Image (spheres, rainbow, N blue to C red):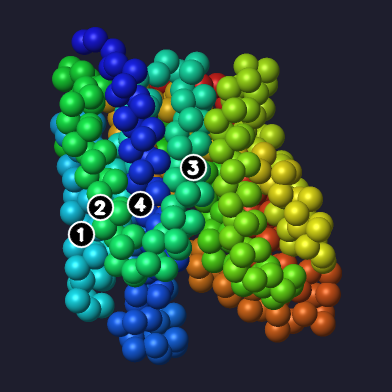
Amino acid sequence: MKPPRQAAIWFILISVLLDVLSFGVLIPVLPNLIKDFTHGDEKWASFYVGLFGTVWAVMHFFCAPILGVLSDKFGRRKILLVSCFGLGLDYILMGLAPNLTWLFIGRIISGITAASFATAGAYIADVTTPDKRAAAFGMFGAAFGVGFVIGPALGGYLGEIDLRLPFWVAAALTLTNACYGLFVLPESLAPELRKPFSWGRANPLGSLRLLMSQPGLLGLGFVYFLYQLAHQVLNNVFVLYTQHRYDWDMRDVGFAMGLVGILNILVQGGLVRPALKRLGESKLLFAGLVFGIIGYSCYGLADTSWKFWLATPIFSLMAFFTPSVQGLMSKRLGPSVQGELQGANGSLSGIAGIIGPFLFSGIFAFGLREKPSLDFAGAGLPFLVAAGCLFVGLIVAIRTLQRPVTTS
């Protein structure tokens, strides 16, 4: 079987970019559309925004392993293209949604199709050698970051014109990419390497059992989960925290989030490859966790906005972690279960996405309520808890990576 053309790898990166961009353009407009459907009732609008986010994470949790295992059986190409076309049609459905029920159905479908990130990750693992895999995952993460930076800005601009316009733009981008993939995307998984579909492997608990199949894989999976859980503090508390502590307006918040995203892109797209050559995957993983611990701690303790800004370049170096851990995990398994591995990682992200909103918003409220006795941090307590998650992850990673690597 001939190796996939370079254009196919670029298709995966462009797919990730466009999928995240399409998701990002909805961030500033979806709450306002929900608010319109609730006739301006902020209480109910807030409830539905939270419900939609949780349901999206739940669908991702259940469907990531299913799509991953399906890609191990039928190949990556079919699953990726079906997911791309499905996501594009789903944006059209949400753009035409006449009420909350149809919008809710659209978000369910979106959570299912977005689970194809697991298959995209498996494709990257198929077409790269183990020694180059972490660097490839770095480019994967950079593409993700570009989409996340551009998406909300584009969505805010389009939403000012019409609340439905971002859905149509997202649909056009996604469907165009899917049509492009029909012509340039070859299959990456040879027929002799495919594995029969099994519900025992495709359900979340079954896919997570894969993490116990090789020494060290479960430990790395737990560290990955702690990282994803800590990352939820940004999604759920960042805006509230910076507005409360520094009196930032939406422009300040948007600029800060954009800066974090841009620095993440620079790290994953430009620094990961040379850092891997110099340090190796294990040391780079440790470095990512250490920088994350320092960054989150500085965010939580920064009593002025200039200290917050100074911490951002340090925090951005946490981006060393993701490509390193993905490279280390993929080395411990053979090609026939790379989809299942990415599905298991998707389930771990889904669990973090379900727990994170309740955990960090609750800690934020506690920090405000108990501020007199927590004057060292107050509202910054969620960031210190996130730093604690990464510290635990660092200890587990050190112990785990002392074990030898074997491949099934």
- Quote the CA–CA distance across marks 1 and 2: 6 Å
Which amino acid, mark 2?
Answer: Ala
Pick the residue in front: 264 or 371. Answer: 264
Answer whether labels 1 and 2 touch (C-beta < 8 Å): yes
- Please tell me the numbered disc located at residue 301: none
Q: Identify the residue shown where x is 48% and y is 30%.
A: 139
Give x and y (percent) for residue 348.
43, 50
Pick the residue in front: 170 or 48. Answer: 170
Give x and y (percent) for residue 55.
33, 66
Q: Earlier in the sequence, mark 1 or mark 4?
A: 4
Give x and y (percent) for residue 283.
67, 27
Which amino acid, mark 1?
Answer: Ile
Which amino acid, mark 3?
Answer: Val
Q: Earlier in the sequence, mark 1 or mark 2?
A: 1
User: Few, some or many C-alpha atoms within 10 Å of disc 3 (few <14, some 14-19, many ≥20)?
Assistant: many
Q: Earlier in the sequence, mark 3 or mark 1?
A: 1
Give the left or right position of residue 264, taking residue 327 as reference.
right
- Please tell me the numbered disc located at residue 22: 4
Secondary element at tag 1: helix
Which amino acid, mark 4?
Answer: Ser
Secondary element at tag 3: helix
**On the image, numbered disc 3 is attached to which residue?**
146
Q: Earlier in the sequence, mark 3 or mark 4?
A: 4
- Quote the CA–CA distance across marks 2 and 3: 18 Å
Pick the residue in front: 248 or 340. Answer: 248
Secondary element at tag 2: helix
- Quote the CA–CA distance across marks 3 and 4: 12 Å
- Please tell me the numbered disc located at residue 92: 1
**On the image, numbered disc 2 is attached to which residue?**
171
Answer whether labels 4 and 2 touch (C-beta < 8 Å): yes
- Quote the CA–CA distance across marks 1 and 4: 12 Å
